[in-house]
Image (cartoon, rainbow, N blue to C red):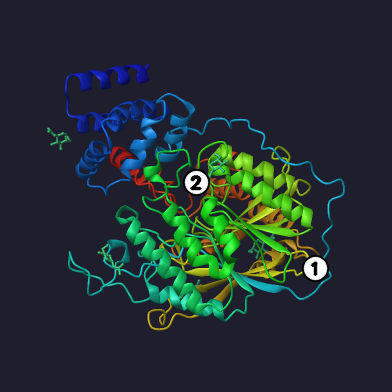
Amino acid sequence: MLFRSLLVASFVAFALGQNITQVILDALESALDCTGCHALLIPLQTLAHLGNDDFVSVITSICTTLGLEDADGPILAHSLRDMSATGATATKFCTAVFGLCDPPAVNAFTVPLAAPPATPKVWKSTGRTPFQVAHFSDVGAEANCSKSICCRNYADEAGDPITQPAGPFGEFTCDAPPALAASMLTAIGGVRAQFALFTGDVEEGDVWLTTEDEVTTDLVDWNSQMAAALNIPVFPVIGNHDTSPVNSFPRNTTDTTFAVPWVFNTQGAGWQQWIGAAAAAQEESNSGSYAVVVPGQNLRFWLYDSDALQPDPNGILAFLAAQLQIAETAGDRAWIIGHMPLGKSDALHDQSNYYNQIIQRYSNTIAAQFFGHSHKDEFEIGYSDYTHQSAATANQFAWICPSLTPTSGNPAFKVYDIDPDTFEVMDMHVHIANLTAPTFQTNPVWEVYYSARDTYGALVGAPTATQVTQCQRFGISVTEAFASNTTAFQEYNTRISRGGMVAACDAACQTTAICDMRALRSENNCPGFQFQEAGLGRGRDECSGSLFGPLFSQLLGAKLT
Ligand SMILES: *[C@@H]1O[C@H](CO)[C@@H](O)[C@H](O)[C@H]1NC(C)=O
Ligand SMILES: *[C@@H]1O[C@H](CO)[C@@H](O)[C@H](O)[C@H]1NC(C)=O
Ligand SMILES: *[C@@H]1O[C@H](CO)[C@@H](O)[C@H](O)[C@H]1NC(C)=O
Ligand SMILES: *[C@@H]1O[C@H](CO)[C@@H](O)[C@H](O)[C@H]1NC(C)=O
Ligand SMILES: *[C@@H]1O[C@H](CO)[C@@H](O)[C@H](O)[C@H]1NC(C)=O
């Protein structure tokens, strides 16, 4: 009923030549639920059909009216033009952009996969000394500081006078200055890792200001900075912020004005020194995905880029499955590295489901998965049967790296101890630089914050050193301890932001947080899991960086207060 009346009202409004900015503002006001969101899409769509320039100009005017930053207009206009306002895609759009719809049921799709081998390879540890691998993510390193997110008292900073200059090594309110990034890379050099994983997002907060030139410069600069500081190979991935406009990785059949070969080509050239020419070429022609065999190790990496549409955008899932089949045939073990953890609420349910089919088929080949994006120190457990979540069905484990950028807590990176026979993670050590320590602004000290084996082993009993860790089983015991022991959970809640910017998490938050840990498939997470985001209306978009979410949240917040 609401939907119909709004729909009519919108068309009448246009017919009378009313102020379209006001019509959209009114529709925003009425968009309190999923139906209202679908109704809001009608005037937005009509506007989108007028062209990108008109769309951007009206959205800019709405932002100005509401006193907000501008949004990523042309992409939204493009999407709006190509969807039906009432269909499932529109529902997904309302879920992702406005948080107003529950995600629609998963579109059943069976990923074509080869039959599993009759006798799966058995992986056994012989108890050799583990080797080390470093993992860092979401650096938000911005060398060119003429932008507001840098918030430093740089000579080139024009505009409002600075009342509280940020320290040279950064603040909780700012992205990471180059000095902090350099300090972290030096610390990583000291942990004697064989290689490092970088799970994406060079760009961070200044999403409304990015241009192709600027993102390219930042990517090139960061690749050079990593190469200069680290004398070990780095296996990097592309984050959702590492493009312009933010989050824009179009399907290859879409309007080519949005295509981003420049991102893939820039990174192919920058990463070739670590991943080799063949993988760099693969990365350039497979939307950022590549596979490499790590020299001296029977270990393969794949990149999975999850910012996409259904069922298998640009053939990335097919690429992943094909590479895992090659690994299985070769008797190799594989790690998957990617930016966005597949269990998060901003991972599309369809693609997460299809991804899960692949990792279930190749669960014996995949030893571990590594992601970033959430800026938090977290993990996700994957199950062969989500209706029977137990130690018997848990068979995947994803490590999520906290960020260097301090906007979500103390700057951090991880070091893993890896069993050289099974390539499973035997322990994880989180290293932090304490931003509130008195010496931070002169000489940040990187120290081990905690070890998973020591800290959680004390709660649930650590696996013995020679045993294959079976992280997922250890993880289940840890989540059980979190569920029954609030003190242990609160300590975890402090650790996810590395003891800085700790957000309160009450009993309901505890329940959804634990549910979230038990979901590497996004349809199984608990909606409403909002650790840090609490208090931002429905601002679940902290990491996705679409500005429509925050815009709407602020509008909603303004209405509710
Ligand atoms: C349209 O509405 C907006 C928001 O109320 C207002 O700021 C703007 O001045 C109006 N434009 C015209 C041409 O009336
Ligand atoms: C720094 O940013 C400004 C404004 O975005 C741009 O004009 C300038 O070319 C950039 N400088 C470098 C070295 O990238
Ligand atoms: C484009 O995407 C399709 C799947 O949607 C894939 O099969 C094809 O290989 C892709 N082409 C390129 C050039 O990436
Ligand atoms: C950081 O340093 C401050 C000040 O010395 C201290 O109170 C705090 O406990 C430290 N945080 C961590 C996580 O070590
Ligand atoms: C609960 O967790 C705390 C903090 O880790 C620990 O000291 C305590 O022994 C745990 N309690 C039980 C009953 O396991």
Task: Compare residues 481 and 201 and report the one nearer the observer.
Answer: 201
Quadrant location, the N terminus? top left
Q: Say which amino acid is labelled 2.
A: Asp
* Residue 322 visible, this orientation: yes
Element type at marker 1? loop
Discs 1/2, front: 2
Q: Residue at x 40, y 59 (%)?
A: 204
Q: State the residue position of label 1.
A: 464
Q: Position of residue 30 (x, y in %)?
A: 31, 28
Q: Residue at x 84, y 51 (%)?
A: 120
Q: Is residue 153 above or below residue 336?
A: below
- Is the residue marked by circle 2 packed among few (<14), some (14-19), or many (20+) residues within 10 Å? many
Element type at marker 2? loop
- The numbered mark, 1 or 2, whose residue comes first in the sequence reads 2
Q: Which mark, residue 282? A: none
Task: Compare residues 209 and 18 and report the one nearer the observer.
Answer: 209
Report the side of 146 relative to 277 (left or right).
left
Q: Residue at x 57, y 49 (%)?
A: 513
Report the side of 510 relative to 500 (left or right).
right
Asked whether disc 1 touches disc 2, contact meaning CB atoms under 8 Å apart, the reply is: no
Task: Compare residues 444 and 157 and report the one nearer the observer.
Answer: 157
Q: Say which amino acid is labelled 1.
A: Thr
Q: Position of residue 31 (x, y in %)?
A: 34, 30
Q: Position of residue 111 (x, y in %)?
A: 66, 37
Q: Position of residue 443 (x, y in %)?
A: 42, 83
Count of numbered circles on the image: 2
Q: Is residue 105 above or below residue 3?
A: below
* Residue 434 visible, this orientation: no
3D distance between C-alphas at marks 1 and 2 = 39 Å
Q: Is residue 3 above or below residue 190?
A: above
Q: State the residue position of label 2.
A: 307
